Image: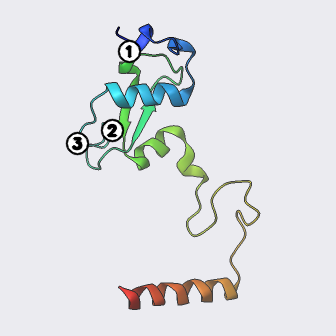
Amino acid sequence: MNRLSNNNPNWKGDKATRQGQHKWIRANKPKPKFCECCKINPPYDVANISQKYYRDINDYEWLCRKCHMHKDGRIKNLKIGQPSGKNHPLYGKPRSDEVKRKISETKLRRKKNE
């Protein structure tokens, strides 16, 4: 008996979660060699184009992380050298001299171990 797709008793169709839909897309949409947006970097993410999350394979694209974050608008929220996430207690605050020194020491140790 074939238990794939809608023949499976656990099949949710259009009522699947976003995670479930992304998993289905990853299994059914061939992954290209390069990002469908920039055509330079290898793709890592499956992104929904319309933001409606239909079970339509043509409504998704394979993107590199940078293009995905640009399309979602998340890239604007990043600050270089700062903890990420607006709920992080250090978000947007400058680092102390002590923290900067420890970071430098850690980087030097890593270079020596390479």
Q: Looking at this view, is 1 or 87 the one in front?
A: 1
Note whether 72 is above or below 22 in the view shown. Answer: below
Mark 1, Cα crowd under 10 Å, few <14 / some 14-19 / many 20+, is few
Q: Is residue 10 found left or right of 25 in the rendered image?
A: right
Q: Looking at this view, is 60 or 37 the one in front?
A: 60
Q: Looking at this view, is 114 or 84 the one in front?
A: 114
What amino acid does circle 1 point to? Leu
Residue bearing mark 1: 4
Query: Which mark's residue is nearer the viewer, 2 or 1?
Result: 1
Q: x, y (%) of residue 18?
A: 55, 27
What amino acid does circle 3 point to? Lys
Residue that appears at 35% across and 29% down = 27
Question: Which quadrant would the N terminus be assigned to in this image?
Answer: top left
Q: Which mark is residue 37?
A: 2
Q: Which mark is residue 33?
A: 3
Residue that appears at 61% across and 52% down = 77
Query: Which quadrant of the figure has residue 110?
Result: bottom left
Q: The residue tagged with tag 2: helix, strand or loop?
A: loop
Residue that appears at 48% across and 84% down = 107
Determine if residue 89 is in view.
Answer: yes
Query: Which mark's residue is nearer the viewer, 3 or 2?
Result: 3
> From mark 3 to mark 2, how far is it between C-alphas?
12 Å
What amino acid does circle 2 point to? Cys
Furthest residue in direction right, as rendered: 89
Residue that appears at 47% across and 38% down = 71
Q: Is residue 16 found left or right of 89 in the rendered image?
A: left
Question: Which quadrant would the C terminus be assigned to in this image?
Answer: bottom left
Determine if residue 48 is in view.
Answer: no
Note whether 28 is above or below 85 in the view shown. Answer: above
> From mark 2 to mark 1, how far is it between C-alphas?
32 Å
